[in-house]
């Protein structure tokens, strides 16, 4: 009995020596280098980040004011309903043409309605009080943001102007001028303009709540616009010292 053996055909080599040599050859790869960020660009980017952070807090303050308006409107509407319920109660008591049983029934319903409205008005008043605190807290954050940025701008502008005067007149001992370069910096218009703005955005708010709310309603937008204009006039200012903590 013969046993047949089937031989598999010889498989071709996957790669020739030449192709293997080609794979082994070094391959030139173009390396894309990231552009170097200049110091001026870094400062400009940081200024944008600072302004964006303040703008976010401004939006939160505006949203808090919107919610406060809703709370106040609801409170005012419920207060009006309470007054109407009290007037209806008084009218029922004075109406002598209605029988006692009928008057009693109406009075019970009127007083029950008034009690419900009084409870809802009390709750609405509490919500308004809480929302006022939220507005004041966001206002304190925005105020601090603007004060910190204003201080950094003032210091940066002072340094820049002082460098200009030092380069023009030299060291103070050699200039022979009757005033110091620092005195001239503090007397020049660009510095005084910024200092006046900084002094106007005081850190402490008004003790009277209504006065503080009135200022926070419109003043922060003006503060922010002024800060943007100051930074736009001198985009190269170093604001690395600005701290915009919310605490």
Image (cartoon, rainbow, N blue to C red):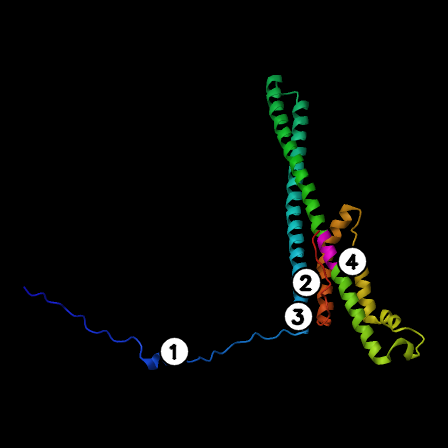
Q: Secondary structure at mark 1?
A: helix
**Viewer-nearest residue: 25 or 70:** 25
> Is residue 121 depicted above or below 182 in this figure?
above
> Is residue 227 depicted above or below 119 in this figure?
below
In which image quadrant can residue 117 be found? Answer: top right
> Mark 4 or mark 3: which comes first in sequence?
3
In which image quadrant can residue 150 be found? Answer: bottom right
Gap between marks 4 and 3 measured at Cα: 27 Å
**Quarter of the image that includes the N terminus:** bottom left
On the rendered structure, is 42 left or right of 198?
Answer: left
**Viewer-nearest residue: 197 or 174:** 174
> Mark 1 or mark 2: which comes first in sequence?
1
- Confirm whether the magenta stretch covers residue 191: no
Marks 1 and 3: which is nearer the front?
Answer: 1
Gap between marks 4 and 1 measured at Cα: 69 Å
> Mark 2 or mark 4: which comes first in sequence?
2
Q: Which residue is mark 2?
A: 50
On the rendered structure, is 232 left or right of 5?
Answer: right
Magenta span covers which residues? Answer: 140-146
What is the total number of numbered labels drawn onto the structure image? 4
x 91%, y 79%: residue: 174
Query: Do the numbered discs 1 and 2 sit on residues whose CB atoms are within 8 Å?
Result: no
Q: Which mark is residue 42?
A: 3
């Amino acid at each position: 009995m013969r046993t047949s053996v089937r031989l598999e055909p010889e498989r071709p080599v996957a790669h020739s020596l030449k192709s293997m040599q080609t794979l082994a050859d070094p391959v030139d790869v173009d390396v894309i280098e990231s552009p170097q960020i200049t110091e001026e660009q870094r400062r400009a980017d940081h200024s944008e980040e600072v302004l964006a952070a303040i703008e976010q807090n401004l939006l939160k303050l505006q949203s808090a004011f919107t919610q406060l308006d809703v709370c106040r409107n609801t409170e005012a509407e419920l207060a009006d309903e309470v007054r109407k319920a009290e007037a209806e109660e008084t009218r029922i008591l004075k109406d002598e043409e209605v029988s006692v049983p009928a008057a009693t029934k109406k009075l019970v319903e009127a007083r029950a309605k008034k009690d419900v409205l009084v409870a809802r008005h009390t709750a609405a008043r509490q919500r308004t009080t809480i929302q006022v605190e939220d507005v004041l807290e966001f206002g304190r954050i925005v105020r601090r943001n603007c004060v910190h940025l204003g201080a950094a701008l003032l210091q940066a502008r002072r340094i820049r102007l002082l460098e200009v005067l030092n380069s023009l007149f030299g060291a103070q001992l050699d200039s022979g001028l009757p005033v110091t370069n620092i005195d001239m910096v503090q007397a020049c218009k660009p510095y005084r303009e910024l200092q006046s703005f900084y002094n106007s955005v005081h850190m402490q708010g008004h003790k009277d709540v209504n006065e503080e709310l009135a200022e926070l309603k419109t003043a922060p937008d003006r503060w922010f616009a002024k800060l943007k204009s100051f930074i736009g006039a001198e985009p190269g200012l170093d604001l690395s010292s600005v701290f915009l903590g919310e605490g």
